[in-house]
């Protein structure tokens, strides 16, 4: 009688849990934002699979989640749910990250895994980054009523955001001990990938923060920008206060009425200020905590003033209008495709 060899089917549920707890949180020390983004992507994917396969997510095997099914999920997200291509690609990034982890944990399923990893991201038209000019920044900084506690807090927060280019998550996680206001004033943050960086503070920013910190209770682990109850100001709270002050500032600066200003727009504003001041892209990448200088390239693309200055320094070629000659019929057809 032949011996039956038992093979363990991959437990998808356990694998996904290990991906989040061990791979993302422990090994990669991913930010809370990244974990939340991946979590939401898999919640949507598993709900889609449950509707399609009539199978509970905890009962799924790795081979149930194949390339055609993932592609169908992405198509539904884009065509039915109406998500943008960028969001669709973020969902796929989460799936790819998990399957790369699965390739190490389940090497016997490499062929199945490679088919999922082969699903390409979609190309999309990249819009120019929005940012504020100096007049708009000045109007926004003047909007908070500094006769009130919340107004002084908001003024200090917006000024710090515009001068340092900190991410929203970095701003809300700041504690008082992250500020160094003596000689060589700077702020210390833990950014993406758990990377620490220090950003210098200007004299004006330092002066505002010195005055602001005098109003805060002196204790360990106290948020730099607390809410009215003394707790940490939430991301939603920052969005709310920023929109309130943008609305007020638009009364004096009409161009703000047509702009959607978010904390990330303030970060873009920092980058554009540095670029227009002649700071090299590699230094801006370090300032903002970008992993790659290529990420900083978007600010070069958006800086029309800098491009015009470059154009003014060049010697234009001696061009002259040409005479129109119709193309060969076949060439015209090919050019029209």
Image (cartoon, rainbow, N blue to C red):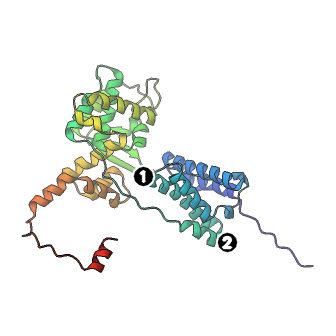
Image quadrant of residue 282?
Answer: bottom left
**Quadrant including the C terminus:** bottom left
Image quadrant of residue 135?
Answer: top left
Residue 129 left/right relative to 112: left
Which residue is outermost to the top? 147
- Which circle marks residue 108 in the picture? 2
- The residue shown at (29%, 38%) is 258
Dot 1: element = loop
- The residue shown at (87%, 76%) is 3
Say few, some or many: other residues with alpha carbon within 10 Å of mark 2 (under 14 / 14 to 19 / 20 or more): few
- For the residue pair 75 and 203, the one nearer the viewer reads as 75
Dot 2: element = helix
Pointer 2 or 1: first along the chain: 2
Q: Mark 2 to mark 1: distance in Å? A: 35 Å
Residue 225, how many percent across, how many down? 39, 31
- The residue shown at (23%, 49%) is 274
Residue 51, how many percent across, how many down? 67, 51
- For the residue pair 9 and 311, the one nearer the viewer reads as 311
Q: In the rendered image of this protein, does residue 193 appear above or below residue 326?
A: above
Can you identify the residue that label 1 sits on? 195
**Quadrant including the N terminus:** bottom right
Residue 81, how many percent across, how many down? 53, 48
Residue 98 left/right relative to 207: right
- For the residue pair 197 and 152, the one nearer the viewer reads as 152
Residue 70 left/right relative to 133: right
Q: Nearer the viewer, mark 2 or mark 1?
A: 2
- For the residue pair 136 and 102, the one nearer the viewer reads as 136
Q: In the rendered image of this protein, does residue 6 appear above or below residue 183?
A: below
Q: Is residue 214 visible?
A: no
Residue 113, how many percent across, how many down? 61, 68
């Amino acid at each position: 009688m032949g011996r039956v060899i038992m093979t363990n089917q991959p437990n998808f549920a356990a694998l996904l849990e290990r991906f989040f707890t061990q791979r993302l949180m422990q090994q990669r020390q991913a930010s809370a934002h990244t974990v939340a983004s991946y979590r939401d992507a898999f919640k949507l994917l598993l709900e889609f699979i449950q509707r399609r396969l009539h199978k509970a997510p905890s009962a799924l095997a790795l081979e149930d989640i194949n390339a055609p099914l993932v592609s169908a999920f992405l198509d539904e997200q884009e065509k039915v749910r109406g998500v943008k291509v960028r969001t669709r690609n973020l969902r796929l990034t989460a799936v790819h990250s998990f399957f790369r982890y699965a390739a190490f944990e389940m090497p016997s399923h490499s062929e199945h895994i490679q088919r999922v990893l082969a699903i390409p991201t979609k190309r999309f038209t990249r819009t120019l980054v929005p940012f504020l000019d100096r007049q708009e920044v000045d109007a926004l900084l003047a909007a908070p009523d500094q006769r009130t506690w919340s107004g002084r807090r908001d003024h200090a927060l917006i000024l710090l955001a515009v001068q340092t280019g900190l991410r929203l998550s970095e701003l809300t996680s700041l504690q008082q001990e992250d500020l160094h206001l003596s000689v060589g004033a700077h702020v210390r943050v833990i950014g993406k990938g758990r990377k620490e960086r220090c950003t210098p503070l200007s004299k004006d920013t330092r002066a505002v923060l010195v005055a602001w910190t005098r109003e805060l209770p002196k204790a360990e682990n106290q948020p730099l920008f607390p809410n009215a109850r003394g707790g940490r100001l939430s991301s939603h709270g920052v969005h709310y206060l920023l929109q309130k002050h943008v609305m007020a500032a638009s009364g004096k600066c009409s161009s703000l009425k047509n702009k959607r200003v978010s904390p990330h727009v303030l970060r873009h504003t920092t980058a554009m200020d540095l670029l227009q001041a002649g700071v090299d892209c590699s230094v801006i990448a370090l300032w903002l905590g970008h992993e790659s200088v290529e990420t900083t390239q978007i600010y070069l693309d958006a800086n029309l003033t800098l491009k015009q200055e470059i154009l003014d320094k060049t010697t234009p070629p001696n061009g002259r209008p040409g005479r129109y000659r119709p193309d060969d019929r076949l060439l015209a057809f090919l050019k029209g495709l």
